[in-house]
């Protein structure tokens, strides 16, 4: 009886120690505990340069959580947006860029954040196969293309002399052309379904809204077909006359060439002087 009592007493004394030990063992060891803002940023930048994007993201997020103010946090927020972009996390990249724009609207590098948003949206609808097999971009969902066009438009409007503005304008032309072609694709779909009024409206929209794009010629062709199907002979004749006249005059333009892929590097921090620490 006495031995059972002693065993129970010993177990009662050891139980709290065992529970505490389990808590310590289960607690994940964080090697960055106690690191300075400079140390966290430097390690994050090195991982980013080494293409270890997830680890870089981890360092930059810890930097922002522990040291939310100061030049290291400012640069880290811009770099984490780029890290998310390279790690193929478009939503997180856009959110990080938006956060930088909101917090630092007067920062000399804020144009980079707008440009990065545009590039993310420009590329986000391109799947794995599209990178190796040429496809018609106008056949894809135009949602991301519209977002990219808006991002580039905002960049050009706010920072017309930005070093990213020239490339942004070129991509806007390409996007606008693809958006127009997408509308023509929709009009042709309506033609196949016998929805001739809807087809005519879509084609007319392209002619009015997307002038100076290669899609105008195709839109006029659909417009002629739709009016004929509707029995609108005079409207069909008018549309055909416009089509022939512009075709003979050589006024229709060719497709905009697809912009070349860019090697978007991480932000250079000369302004902040972080490389001098």
Image (tube, grey):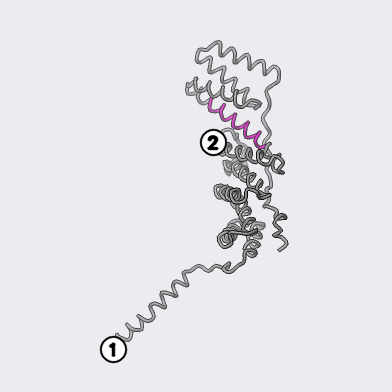
**Foreground of the two, 157 or 214:** 157
Identity of the residue drawn at 54% across and 36% down: 141
**Placement of 75 over or under 262, stated as above or below:** below
Name the image quarter holding the N terminus. bottom left
Question: Residue 176 magenta-drawn?
Answer: yes
Residue 146 lies in quadrant: top right
Q: How crowded is mark 2: few (under 14 residues within 10 Å), some or many (20 or more)?
A: few
Identity of the residue drawn at 67% across and 48% down: 264
Question: Residue 274 magenta-drawn?
Answer: no
Q: What stretch is highlighted in magenta?
A: 170-187
Which residue is the extreme one toward the front? 106
Residue 144 lies in quadrant: top right
Give how far across and how far down residue 106 sits, in percent.
65, 48
**Magenta region's main secondary structure?**
helix
Q: How crowded is mark 1: few (under 14 residues within 10 Å), some or many (20 or more)?
A: few
Please give the residue where the numbered disc 1 appears in the rendered image: 2
Relative to 266, 200 lies left or right: left
Give how far across and how far down residue 209 sits, in percent.
60, 26
Whichever of labels 2 and 1 marks the residue nearer the N terminus, that label is 1
Give how far across and how far down residue 275 sits, in percent.
71, 60
Q: How many labels does the image show?
A: 2
Q: Distance between the residues labelled 2 and 1?
A: 79 Å
Please give the residue where the numbered disc 2 appears in the rendered image: 141
**Foreground of the two, 38 or 82:** 38
SS for tag 2?
Answer: loop
Identity of the residue drawn at 68% across and 25% down: 253
């Amino acid at each position: 009886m006495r031995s059972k009592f002693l065993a129970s007493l010993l177990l009662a004394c050891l139980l709290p120690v065992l529970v505490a030990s389990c808590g310590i063992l289960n607690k994940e060891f964080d090697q960055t505990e106690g690191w300075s803002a400079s140390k966290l940023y430097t390690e994050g930048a090195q991982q980013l340069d080494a293409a270890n994007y997830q680890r870089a993201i981890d360092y930059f997020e810890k930097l922002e959580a522990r040291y939310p103010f100061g030049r290291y946090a400012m640069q880290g927020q811009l770099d984490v947006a780029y890290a998310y972009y390279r790690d193929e996390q478009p939503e997180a990249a856009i959110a990080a860029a938006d956060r930088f724009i909101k917090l630092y609207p007067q920062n000399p590098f804020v144009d980079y954040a707008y440009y990065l948003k545009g590039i993310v949206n420009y590329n986000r609808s391109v799947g794995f196969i599209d990178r190796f097999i040429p496809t018609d971009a106008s056949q894809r969902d135009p949602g991301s293309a519209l977002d990219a066009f808006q991002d580039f438009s905002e960049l050009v409007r706010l920072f017309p002399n930005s070093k990213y503005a020239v490339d942004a304008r070129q991509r806007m032309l390409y996007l606008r052309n693809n958006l127009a072609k997408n509308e023509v694709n929709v009009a042709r779909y309506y033609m196949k379904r016998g929805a001739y009024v809807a087809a005519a409206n879509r084609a007319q929209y392209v002619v009015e809204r997307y002038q100076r794009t290669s899609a105008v010629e195709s839109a006029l062709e659909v417009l002629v077909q739709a009016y004929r199907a509707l029995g609108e002979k005079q409207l069909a004749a008018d549309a055909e006359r416009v089509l022939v006249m512009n075709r003979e005059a050589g006024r229709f333009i060719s497709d905009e060439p697809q912009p070349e892929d860019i090697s978007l590097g991480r932000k250079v921090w000369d302004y902040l002087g972080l490389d001098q620490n």
